Amino acid sequence: MHRNIAEILIEPERLQARIAELAEKISADYHGRTLSLIGVLKGSVLFLSDLLKGLKLDAHVDFMMVSSYSGQKSTGVVRTLLDLKESIEGRDVLVVEDIVDSGLTVDYLLKNLKTRRPRSVEVCTLLDKPSCRAVKVPIRYKGFEIPDKFVVGYGLDYNELYRNLPYIGVLKPSAIKGK
Ligand code: 5GP
C-alpha cells in the first residue's frame, strides 16, 4: 500500500468485477446501437478504458474536461476546459464519470450536452457519494456508493498525484496540505 494511504476502500479485484458487470448491462441495454462514450477528464480515464474493453457494442469515444475542483474543495462553479471533437447530434451518449459528489459537474454536463440534441444521454459513474448531493442528478449506471470521504486512486487524484494506484483509497490526513 502507498505510504500516504490510510485505508483501501475498494480493492482492484472488486473494481474489475463490478466494471465487467456494468459493461454487460450497458451492452444489453444498448444492444444493436452505437454508443458515444464521453469521458470526463482526467479522473475517468482508467474507468473508461476498462469499461470500454468490456463493451460488446460499436462505440465512439470522446472527452471533455471541466473544472469545479481545486485541491479537496469544490468551487461550485463549473467551466468547460476542453470540449468534444465530434458532434453528438442524434447519438446515444453515455457520460463516464469517476465520481459524483455534489452533482454540480454532472448537472452542468447534462444541461450542456442536451443543447446539442443527442438521441439520448445517460450517466455512468464509478463512484457515488450520495450524502454530498447539492443538486439531484439522474445516474443510470453506478459502480459503488461510498461514504463522505475524499478518495484517490484508479484515476482519481489529489493535486495530480495518486491516479496510478490500482485501488480506491483514503488519504492519510498527514498527506493533505494544511493538515
Ligand atoms: P461534483 O461536481 O459532483 O461535486 O464533483 C465531481 C468531481 O469532483 C469529480 O469528477 C472529481 O473530479 C471531483 N471529486 C469529488 N469527490 C472527489 C473525491 O473524493 N476524490 C477525488 N480525487 N476527486 C473528487
Image (cartoon, rainbow, N blue to C red):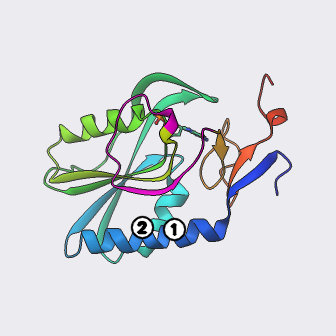
Apparent side of residue 55 relative to residue 70 in the rendered image (left or right): left
Check whether the beta carbons of the residues at disc 1 and disc 2 lie within 8 A of each other. yes
Within-10-Å neighbours for mark 2: few <14, some 14–19, many 20+: many
Q: Nearer the viewer, residue 21 or 114?
A: 21
Numbered disc total: 2
How far is mark 1 from mark 2, CA to CA?
Answer: 6 Å
Is 63 part of what is drawn in magenta?
A: no
Would you name the residue on which mark 2 appears? 22
The residue under the point 79% across, 48% down is: 5
Secondary structure under tag 2 reads helix
Q: Is mark 1 within 8 Å of ligand 1?
A: no
The answer to which image quadrant residue 135 occupies is top left
On screen, residue 116 versus residue 126, left or right, reads: left
Image quadrant where one finds the N terminus: bottom right
Q: From the viewer's perspective, tell me whether residue 144 is left or right of residue 109.
A: right
Residue with the mark numbered 1: 18
Stretch of the chain drawn in magenta: 131-148
